[in-house]
Image (cartoon, rainbow, N blue to C red):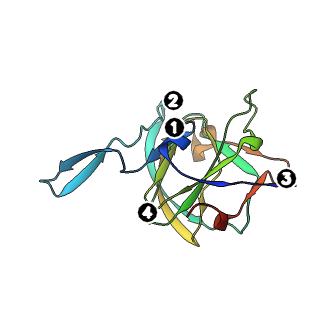
Amino acid sequence: MVKSLKIERLSKDAFAAFGTVIEAAGAVEIAINQGTTSRFHALCNVDVATGGGQPIISLFRGTRRPDPIEIQLMERHPLGSQSFMPLSEHDWLVVVAPTNADDSGPDFDGLRVFRASGNQGVSYSRNVWHHPLLILQSQQDFIVIDRAGPDDENNSANLQEVWSDGVAAVIKPDLGPA
């Protein structure tokens, strides 16, 4: 029987073991531009310098997967962090897993899924196992900040993927926190 994952609300405390929640709530707010703009300062660190990496900004356009969402693949980035910030106020899903004790891959039994609001982004720490982008609309755009490096054509040096033996878990998006 395939495990059905319970969707948790994304919060800074619940996500701390996997990275940083990017949101204005609780951030240092600085008035700039003659008081016409609020800067929410240093919402997360960008960790990309390993192996001569440099930060890049990309646009990712996700499309919705069929329901229930089947979790079979997890990925991680050993050379740097990866940050996602939605460009619309639609909820989306974040799936993470701890690393197996022998570092052989993700612990598919430890999968967790969070519902992020359209005002929340995440920054996965280096080496954190996560599922590729999961959205709840037919299409949704994200600004992504991650790493490009000299050894890294098409980001292959900074991408490890592990497939489970069959479906590791399913997510029923309509059953999670709104």
Q: Is residue 57 left or right of residue 33?
A: right
Label 3 or label 4, whichever comes before in sequence order: 4
The residues tagged by marks 2 and 3 sit, at their Cα atoms, a distance apart of 34 Å
In the foreground, 16 or 124? 16
Label 1 or label 3, whichever comes before in sequence order: 1
Q: Which mark is residue 166?
A: 3
Of the residues shown, which amino acid type is indicated by label 4? Leu
Q: Depth-wise, is mark 1 or mark 2 nearer the camera?
A: 2
Q: Give the farthest residue toward the top.
A: 102
Q: Is residue 154 left or right of residue 54?
A: right
Q: Depth-wise, is mark 2 or mark 4 nearer the camera?
A: 4
The residues tagged by marks 2 and 4 sit, at their Cα atoms, a distance apart of 28 Å
Q: Residues within 10 Å of mark 1 (few under 14, many from 20)?
A: many
User: Which residue lies under the disc numbered 4?
Assistant: 87
Q: Depth-wise, is mark 2 or mark 3 nearer the camera?
A: 3
Label 4 or label 1, whichever comes before in sequence order: 4
Of the residues shown, which amino acid type is indicated by label 3? Gly
Q: Is residue 42 left or right of residue 108?
A: left
